[in-house]
Image: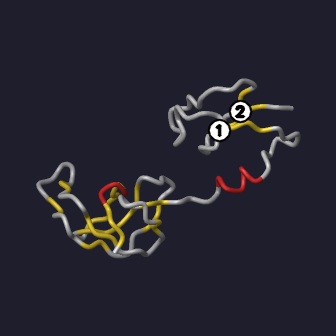
């Protein structure tokens, strides 16, 4: 039976071609992929959903424990603390979101967006 699925991790399935409209999906507003499986597991596509690929601002893949450098001055919300461009962050931890990483910076545990990081 031919149907269309979202590869963004939301599990969206449709009988008609279209786009994913799930608010929290990383593939929101992207085209659904055609699938012709009969078991509902969607073949290899389900296996690739478990692999989280996090990339820095240059497209370099990041892993747990990597060292990164800030590429922009960042002000910590609610404080007057500013982390300057070029500040090295050691030992990042990946989160469940491809756009964010956990780290310790200036004695505080914070979340940084990957668009402001460059792998060392």
Judge the density around disc 1: few (<14), some (14-19), many (≥20) Cα neighbours within 10 Å.
Answer: many
Distance from the alpha carbon under mark 2 to that under mark 1: 7 Å
Give the side of residue 82 with respect to residue 120, left or right.
left
- Secondary structure at numbered mark 2: strand
Give the side of residue 27 with respect to residue 11, left or right.
left
Q: Furthest-left residue in view? A: 80
Q: Residue at x 72, y 51 (%)?
A: 46
Judge the density around disc 2: few (<14), some (14-19), many (≥20) Cα neighbours within 10 Å.
Answer: some
Q: Residue at x 52, y 35 (%)?
A: 28
Q: Is residue 23 above or below residue 52?
A: above
Image spot of residue 104 (x, y percent): 31, 69
Indicate the quadrant where residue 14 lies. top right
Residue 32, numbered circle: none
In the picture, the quarter occupied by the C terminus is: bottom left
Image spot of residue 62 (x, y percent): 45, 67
Q: Is residue 52 above or below residue 29?
A: below
Indicate the quadrant where residue 89 lies. bottom left
Where does label 2 land, which residue? Answer: 13
Image spot of residue 48 (x, y percent): 67, 56
Residue 6, numbered circle: 1
Kindly check if marks 2 and 1 are in contact, taking CB atoms under 8 A apart as contact: yes
Q: Residue at x 14, y 59 (%)?
A: 81
Give the side of residue 92 with respect to residue 107, left or right.
right
In the picture, the quarter occupied by the N terminus is: top right
Image spot of residue 34 (x, y percent): 73, 36
Q: Residue at x 61, y 45 (%)?
A: 9
Which residue is more in the foreground, 71 or 11? 71
Q: Earlier in the sequence, mark 2 or mark 1?
A: 1
- Secondary structure at numbered mark 1: loop
């Amino acid at each position: 039976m031919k149907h269309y699925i979202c590869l963004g991790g939301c599990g969206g399935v449709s009988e008609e071609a279209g786009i994913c409209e799930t608010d929290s999906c990383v593939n929101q507003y992207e085209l659904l992929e055609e699938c012709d499986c009969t078991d509902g597991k969607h073949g290899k596509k389900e296996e690739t959903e478990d692999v989280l690929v996090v990339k820095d601002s240059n497209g370099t893949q990041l892993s747990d424990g990597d060292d990164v450098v800030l590429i922009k001055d960042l002000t910590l919300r609610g404080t007057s603390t500013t982390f300057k461009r070029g500040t090295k962050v050691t030992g990042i931890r990946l989160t469940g979101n491809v756009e964010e990483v956990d780290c310790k910076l200036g004695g505080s545990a914070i979340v940084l967006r990957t668009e402001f990081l460059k792998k060392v």
